[in-house]
Image (tube, grey):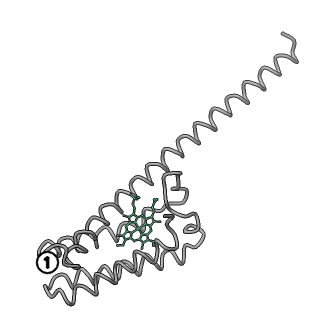
């Protein structure tokens, strides 16, 4: 091989190595994003299940049971305090329904999170009693706070 050819072979080898290293990094990032989205959607699924249970009782579709309602409210409040952490930058995949705007409008996004958490805390406190007429509006306020964010930052 001539020196020029050897140099060319070396350049090609370096370039190919860089491409593989680059795609390896991209794959690792994709896997991490997929994992983050999965965790977030799972947490929301648990949150949604508690809301479903409470909603059935609040609307009369299921009989009101103070104990199961209170437990659901406590669980929901616990998860509500956790979900704000589940939106790290770059945690977006085709599978995610999160709109990219939420990372550009962090102030508004976090305000909606805070609002949901405070409504949820009120619901959990209210649910320690067993007056459904007091619980119902507290539950409705939580539902509205979920919807406010979904309307803005979640794709249908
Ligand atoms: C501040 C914003 C915000 C608030 C508040 C919020 N959500 Fe969401 N929610 C999202 C976003 C964004 C997604 C999409 C997540 C994804 O697909 O990556 C989502 C997804 C979901 C999902 C679908 C999960 C899945 O498997 O695809 C459920 C269920 C859900 N939220 C329930 C709730 C409930 C119940 C509340 C209120 C108690 C709530 N959310 C409050 C932003 C919010």
Could you tell whether 135 is left or right of 48 in the image? Answer: left
- Report the front residue among 8 and 64: 64
Could you tell whether 20 is left or right of 99 in the image? Answer: right
Where does the image place residue 55, in percent across and percent down from the top left? 25, 74
Q: Residue at x 45, y 54 (%)?
A: 37
Could you tell whether 69 is left or right of 5 in the image? Answer: left
- Report the front residue among 15 and 109: 109
Q: Residue at x 51, y 69 (%)?
A: 153
Please state, as top left, top right, bottom left or bottom right, where the N terminus lies in the image.
top right
Q: Secondary structure at mark 1?
A: loop
Could you tell whether 42 is left or right of 50 in the image? Answer: right
Dividing the image into four quarters, tell me where ligand 1 lies: bottom left
Where does the image place residue 131, in percent across and percent down from the top left? 15, 88
Q: Residues within 10 Å of mark 1 (few under 14, many from 20)?
A: some
Name the quadrant containing residue 146: bottom left
Q: Residue at x 47, y 48 (%)?
A: 34
Where does the image place residue 96, in percent across and percent down from the top left? 49, 56
Residue located farthest toward the top when viewing the structure as drawn: 1
Does mark 1 have its CB less than 8 Å from ligand 1? no
Where does the image place residue 87, in percent across and percent down from the top left? 47, 62
- Tell me if residue 92 comes above or below residue 19 in the rendering: below
Q: Which residue is mark 1?
A: 64
């Amino acid at each position: 091989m001539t020196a020029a050819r050897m140099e060319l072979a070396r350049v090609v080898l370096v370039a190919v190595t860089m491409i593989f290293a680059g795609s390896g990094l991209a794959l690792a990032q994709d896997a991490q994003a997929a994992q983050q989205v999965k965790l977030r959607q799972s947490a929301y699924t648990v949150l949604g299940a508690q809301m479903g249970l409470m909603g059935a009782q609040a609307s009369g579709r299921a009989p009101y049971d103070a104990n199961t309602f209170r437990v659901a409210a406590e669980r929901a409040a616990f998860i509500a305090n956790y979900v704000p952490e589940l939106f790290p930058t770059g945690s977006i995949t085709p599978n995610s329904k999160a709109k990219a705007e939420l990372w550009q409008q962090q102030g508004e996004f976090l305000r909606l999170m805070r609002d949901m958490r405070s409504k949820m805390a009120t619901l959990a406190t209210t649910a320690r009693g067993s007056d459904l007429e007091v619980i119902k509006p507290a539950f409705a306020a939580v539902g509205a706070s979920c919807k406010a964010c979904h309307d803005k930052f979640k794709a249908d």
